[in-house]
Image (cartoon, helix red, strand yellow):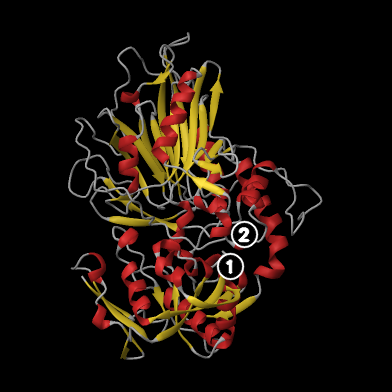
């Protein structure tokens, strides 16, 4: 498993998109008008017309992405969304949890005879203890109960390798840990689509490339891909024996295949995404005003996917948007993403034209909705959570440390990032007293540590389950030697090369300091003369012993220089390292305070 970042670099040129098509007045809506020949549907019929089969049929597409095994409501900022108010102000809303997601989806389906539910990948991986401890079988069970119809794979579906992904699809007990109950794990009721993930041996997709949803005379094809750059954000072991192909070429290939089979309505499920101009889930993406639009990898992807594809469900960046991006013919096409962790779902109306078998694009409407926690919990999800929590409790409820306040993971340099780097430096010194510093990738920090009790443990108590949620990857903490020149180059790689457009700022241990000047560009944003260790400038010729997880040690997240380290030493897993540090440095009467996050001086 690997600690990944969700601001994935790409080779493609990216830029902000501002919709220019006339009449785009609502977020995620192409146009409010139905086709000229259509009339409003009778209530609950899901079609247009009165008493006969009409030409047009509304199909409800419900979608979400990047659940990451969050069965219980996520904590801290991971469990909130920002909502734009009519007066221009914003407010935050508590959101997420499959007990509530199930209720919202079931309510949304009411009155919609034609409804399909799809997902954009990363349903599992980097999961909290209740799911991750059991190799995400609980999440697959929950998705079955949610009546998920289809999903693309994401990069995290490969955290434990393709064989484990195949087990999640097909069922069977875990090869090492066995069965967790007297019932054999049956696998996913829905297909995982992996059109651009090929076996190096056979050259064929490792799972189905596409799937066709049918209801009476209406049929819609779904093509699923993950980001081509998956090998750069997953451990080498997880993608061993696999090839990842270009998203656009793959989708265009299978769109032609679907058309040859007579399927003309097509949706692409793409585990790659963009960066919206607003952090509010309900901002007007297509207003054309300042602050609208979306940027990032999905823009170039969307602009090049064949017009035969009618809508794109995306993910990976954990952002929320319901936008339109022009297809290669210049016509606007819906592109959506529902944030992450089950906090939102997207409701898209696709108007199917029975005469052509295609989607009437001028009628596509889409909007994100909050999975609020003010609805009734779904009893079947409550029972599922209770079952797995009972199994996990003896491990998960054990205290491993104490904190005096929330230790957040947000910011260029975060308090939690500092804490984890310090823990890895302390462990490195246990392995080798000559260890000088530690580096931690921000994408490997999955949740904050919150002061408020999550259960019965009491405020300020950090449980094993909470630690697992922060670092769920089972990465090892390794040591390797780097020259001073290489160390400087590593810091430069945070803001250059593949990370130039979306910097990945490593979290650093105490003693390492430098200035990050964001008024400059490229590698110059890291001010070379400012880089110091314990107050002394980095010596380019000297050798430094550096602690880091195995994902970084393999050159992950674009840090190719880290893959060139020498004299490696493999240690224990990162969660054990964090646990050791918290236990050694905190007590109920002397808890750990949030680090100051003052090691990187940021110039704006």
Tell me the residue that label 2 is attached to: 132
Is the N terminus in the top left, top right, bottom left or bottom right quadrant?
Answer: bottom right
Q: Looking at the image, which residue is at 55% across and 75% down?
A: 477
Q: How many marks?
A: 2
Whether pointer 2 and pointer 1 mark residues with C-beta atoms closer than 8 Å, the reply is: yes
Q: Position of residue 555 (x, y in %)?
A: 45, 65
Q: Is residue 527 visible?
A: yes
Q: Looking at the image, which residue is at 41% across and 31% down?
A: 252
Residue 493 vs 33, above or below: the answer is: below
Q: Callout 2 environment at 10 Å: few (<14), some (14 to 19), or many (20+)?
A: many
Query: Which sits in the foreground, 564 or 233?
Result: 564
Query: Which sits in the foreground, 226 or 88?
Result: 226
Tell me the residue that label 1 is attached to: 468
Is the C terminus in the top left, top right, bottom left or bottom right quadrant?
Answer: bottom left
Q: Position of residue 447 (x, y in %)?
A: 48, 65
Q: Is residue 587 visible?
A: no
* In-image side of 408 versus 33 (left or right): right
Q: Position of residue 133 (x, y in %)?
A: 65, 61
Q: Callout 1 environment at 10 Å: few (<14), some (14 to 19), or many (20+)?
A: many
Q: Looking at the image, which residue is at 29% across and 46% down?
A: 283
The picture quadrant where one finds residue 89 is bottom left
Residue 407 vs 300, above or below: the answer is: below
Q: Distance of mark 2 from mark 1, alpha carbons?
A: 8 Å
Determine the secondary structure under disc 2.
helix
Q: Position of residue 148 (x, y in %)?
A: 57, 38
Determine the secondary structure under disc 1.
helix
Query: Which sits in the foreground, 103 or 442?
Result: 442
């Amino acid at each position: 498993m690997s600690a990944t970042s969700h601001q994935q670099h790409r080779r493609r040129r990216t830029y902000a998109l501002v919709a220019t098509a006339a009449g785009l007045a609502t977020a995620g809506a192409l146009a409010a008008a139905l086709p000229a020949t259509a009339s409003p549907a009778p209530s609950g019929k899901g079609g247009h017309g009165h008493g006969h089969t009409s030409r047009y049929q509304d199909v409800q597409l419900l979608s979400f992405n990047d659940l990451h095994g969050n069965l219980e409501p996520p904590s801290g900022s991971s469990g909130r969304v920002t909502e734009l108010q009519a007066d221009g102000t914003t407010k935050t809303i508590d959101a997420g949890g499959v007990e509530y997601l199930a209720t919202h989806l079931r309510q949304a389906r009411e009155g919609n005879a034609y409804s399909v539910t799809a997902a954009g990948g990363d349903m599992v991986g980097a999961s909290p203890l209740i799911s991750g401890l059991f190799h995400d079988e609980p999440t697959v069970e929950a998705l079955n109960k949610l009546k998920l119809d289809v999903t693309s794979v994401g990069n995290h579906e490969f955290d434990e390798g393709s064989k484990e992904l195949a087990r999640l699809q097909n069922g069977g007990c875990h090869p090492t840990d066995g069965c967790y109950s007297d019932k054999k794990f049956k696998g996913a009721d829905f297909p995982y689509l992996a059109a651009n993930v090929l076996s190096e041996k056979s050259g064929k997709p490792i799972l189905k490339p596409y799937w066709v949803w049918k209801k009476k005379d209406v049929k819609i094809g779904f093509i699923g891909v993950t980001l081509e750059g998956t090998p750069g954000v997953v451990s080498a072991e997880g993608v061993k024996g696999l090839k990842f192909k270009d998203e656009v070429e793959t989708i265009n290939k299978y769109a032609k295949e679907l058309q040859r089979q007579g399927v003309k309505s097509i949706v692409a499920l793409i585990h790659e995404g963009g960066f919206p101009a607003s952090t509010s889930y309900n901002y007007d993406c297509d207003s054309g005003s300042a602050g609208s639009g979306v940027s990032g990898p999905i823009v170039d992807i969307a602009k090049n996917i064949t017009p035969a594809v009618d809508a794109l469900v995306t993910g990976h960046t954990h952002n929320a948007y319901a936008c339109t991006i022009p297809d290669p013919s210049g016509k606007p096409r819906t592109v959506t993403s529902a944030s992450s962790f089950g906090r939102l779902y997207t409701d898209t109306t696709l108007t199917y034209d029975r005469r052509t078998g295609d989607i009437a694009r001028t009628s596509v409407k889409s909007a994100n909705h909050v999975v609020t926690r003010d609805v009734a919990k779904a009893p079947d999800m409550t029972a599922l959570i209770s079952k797995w929590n009972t199994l996990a409790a003896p491990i998960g409820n054990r205290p491993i440390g104490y904190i005096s306040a929330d230790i957040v993971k947000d910011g260029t340099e975060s308090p939690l990032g500092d804490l984890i780097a310090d823990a890895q430096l302390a462990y490195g010194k246990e392995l080798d007293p000559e260890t000088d510093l530690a580096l931690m990738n921000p994408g490997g920090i999955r949740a904050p540590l919150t002061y408020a009790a999550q259960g019965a443990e009491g405020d300020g108590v950090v449980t094993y389950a909470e630690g697992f949620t922060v670092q769920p990857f089972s990465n090892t903490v390794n040591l390797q030697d780097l020259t001073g020149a290489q160390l400087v180059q590593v810091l430069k790689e945070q803001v250059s090369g593949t990370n130039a457009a979306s910097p990945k700022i490593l979290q650093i241990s105490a003693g390492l300091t430098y200035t990050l000047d964001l008024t400059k560009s490229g590698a110059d944003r890291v001010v070379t003369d400012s880089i110091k260790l314990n107050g002394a400038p980095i010596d380019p010729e000297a050798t430094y012993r550096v602690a880091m997880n195995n994902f970084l040690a393999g050159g992950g997240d674009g840090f190719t220089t880290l893959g060139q380290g020498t004299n490696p030493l493999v240690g224990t897993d990162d969660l054990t390292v964090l646990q050791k540090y918290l236990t050694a440095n905190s007590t109920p009467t002397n808890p750990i305070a949030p680090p100051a996050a003052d090691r990187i001086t940021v110039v704006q």
